[in-house]
Image: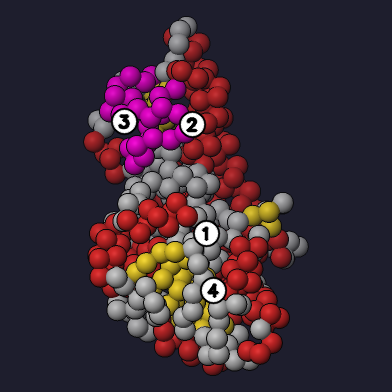
């Protein structure tokens, strides 16, 4: 493909769906990734995903030649960076992949190009990207446009959200914001809110930190209720009848590459000021440890009564319901710990994955029938097919399956 309307750098969970979505809006896209195997798979349409509609949309885009993946950096008017920003050392954000893209981009950009950063990034990263490129391309000083426009989509419903969600656009100057707005207008039905890049960067972090704090409240409640012998689901349901109360659901911890990560981006830059944000991270991390202790307690109690082997079913490994993503999954961590302690007595179930390196996966109905203790970690829709009977076996419900 020559002369794509835009180039997307990073073909992961967000970059690939964004690429094929744009190509349905008559914006031709060239997608760049360093992973040659992934690029080859994408170019044949042979991808593993549970994101509804992604494979079909990709095949259509490839057929119409509106999308192609590659490893080389080419020329285009619009560049969108959607690469990962992982952790380094002590929960500090590592922006080296973004910086490496900026470095390579500096050899292909030309006057008037718009460079958009979508990756979740610490405050100041968009300015850093512009500094990296201008340092190498003094000839283009002040002749490029830079904006931060965070993605806000929920895995599992990416296409709907790409289309409908409001977007925040923060340019390094007003001209950049306006230029980026003209681009997003082509495919976003939601409102586009213009601001500066530092505010937009903080806005993305704050959205996820706010959700983390709210989930921490629900998780803390679940631990209190366990001690007070109160059903937390029932309690939350009743409290939420108040017109101004909206408590989220407790779970076995917080996972994924967003909510469990982004608050640290604020915390590491502003450790003294981020008190609630830091505490929420601790509570949500502690919740999975607490779940593991409850499982252990239950197994040991039943072993004493039964005086023989106790078989445990672990239901769900992904970081949230009805997806196939195990990144930072607290359920997977808990399953590993239980498996490492109790070995072959543990039956592990994850209906959204065909296989996983660490364990042999077992059919969920079979596992439920066989186990003495059923531990529900993730509230997958498929588990509704199980006839759960709390009178015939011990059920540990950490995700509201019985609610
Ligand atoms: N969780 C709970 N209780 C709840 C809701 C969620 O324990 O009531 C847990 C989930 O099980 C999961 C974790 O929180 O382990 C995160 O799940 P999520 O559905 O809250 O969020 P993500 O990580 O899939 O996506 C979030 C979204 N951000 C917000 O809702 C503020 C999404 O809009 C962002 O685009 C995404 O992060 C991102 O990429 O940053």
Please name whichever residue, 105 or 159, is drawn nearer the observer in this view of the structure: 105
Mark 2 Cβ and ligand 1 under 8 Å apart: no
Q: Which residue is mark 4?
A: 117
Disc 2 from disc 1: Cα separation? 27 Å
- Can you tell which mark lies on residue 364? 3
Residues at marks 3 and 4 touching, judged by CB atoms closer than 8 Å: no
Disc 1 from disc 4: Cα separation? 18 Å
Q: Which residue is mark 2?
A: 358
Residues at marks 1 and 3 touching, judged by CB atoms closer than 8 Å: no
Q: Which residues are magenta?
A: 346-372
Please name whichever residue, 41 or 223, is drawn nearer the observer in this view of the structure: 41
Residue 205, picture quadrant: bottom right
Q: Which residue is mark 1?
A: 34
Disc 3 from disc 4: Cα separation? 41 Å
Q: Is residue 142 left or right of residue 239?
A: right
Closer to the eye: label 3 or 2: 2
Between disc 3 and disc 2, whose residue precedes? 2
Residue at x-position 41% and y-position 64%: 69
Between disc 4 and disc 2, whose residue precedes? 4
Mark 4 Cβ and ligand 1 under 8 Å apart: no
Coloring applied to the structure: secondary structure
Q: Position of residue 214 (x, y in %)?
A: 52, 57
Please name whichever residue, 209 or 229, is drawn nearer the observer in this view of the structure: 209
Q: Position of residue 339 (x, y in %)?
A: 51, 25
């Amino acid at each position: 493909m020559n002369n794509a309307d835009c180039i997307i750098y990073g073909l992961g969970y967000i970059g690939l769906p964004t690429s094929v979505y744009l190509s349905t809006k008559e914006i031709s896209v060239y997608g760049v990734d360093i992973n040659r195997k992934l690029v080859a798979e994408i170019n044949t349409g042979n991808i593993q995903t549970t994101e509804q509609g992604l494979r079909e949309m990709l095949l259509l885009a490839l057929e119409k030649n509106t999308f192609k993946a590659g490893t080389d950096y080419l020329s285009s008017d619009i560049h969108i960076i959607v690469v990962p920003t992982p952790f380094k050392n002590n929960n500090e954000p590592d922006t080296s992949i973004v910086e490496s893209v900026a470095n390579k981009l500096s050899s292909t950009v030309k006057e008037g190009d718009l460079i958009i950063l979508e990756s979740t990034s610490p405050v100041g990263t968009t300015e850093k990207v512009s500094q990296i490129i201008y340092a190498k391309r003094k000839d283009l000083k002040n002749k490029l446009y830079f904006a931060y426009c965070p993605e806000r989509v929920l895995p599992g419903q990416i296409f709907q959200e790409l289309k409908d969600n409001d977007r925040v656009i923060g340019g390094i100057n007003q001209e950049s914001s306006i230029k980026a707005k003209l681009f997003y207008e082509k495919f976003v039905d939601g409102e586009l809110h213009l601001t500066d890049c530092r505010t937009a960067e903080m806005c993305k972090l704050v959205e996820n930190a706010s959700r983390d704090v709210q989930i921490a409240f629900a998780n803390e409640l679940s631990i209190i209720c366990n001690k007070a012998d109160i059903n937390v689901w029932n309690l939350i349901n009743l409290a939420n009848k108040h017109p101004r109360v909206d408590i989220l659901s407790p779970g076995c911890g917080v996972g994924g590459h967003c909510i469990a990560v982004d608050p640290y981006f604020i915390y590491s830059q502003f450790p003294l000021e981020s008190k609630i944000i830091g505490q929420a991270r601790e509570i949500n991390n502690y919740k999975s440890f607490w779940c593991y202790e409850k499982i252990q307690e239950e197994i040991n109690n039943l072993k004493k009564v039964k005086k023989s082997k106790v078989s445990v079913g672990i239901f769900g490994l992904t970081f949230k319901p009805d997806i196939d993503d195990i990144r930072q999954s607290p359920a997977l961590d808990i399953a590993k710990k239980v498996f490492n302690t109790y070995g072959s007595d543990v039956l592990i179930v994850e209906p959204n994955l065909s296989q996983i390196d660490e364990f042999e996966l077992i059919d969920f109905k079979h596992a439920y029938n066989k186990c003495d203790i059923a531990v529900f970690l993730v509230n997958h829709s498929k588990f509704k097919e199980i006839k759960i009977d709390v009178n015939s076996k011990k059920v540990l419900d950490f995700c509201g399956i019985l609610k």
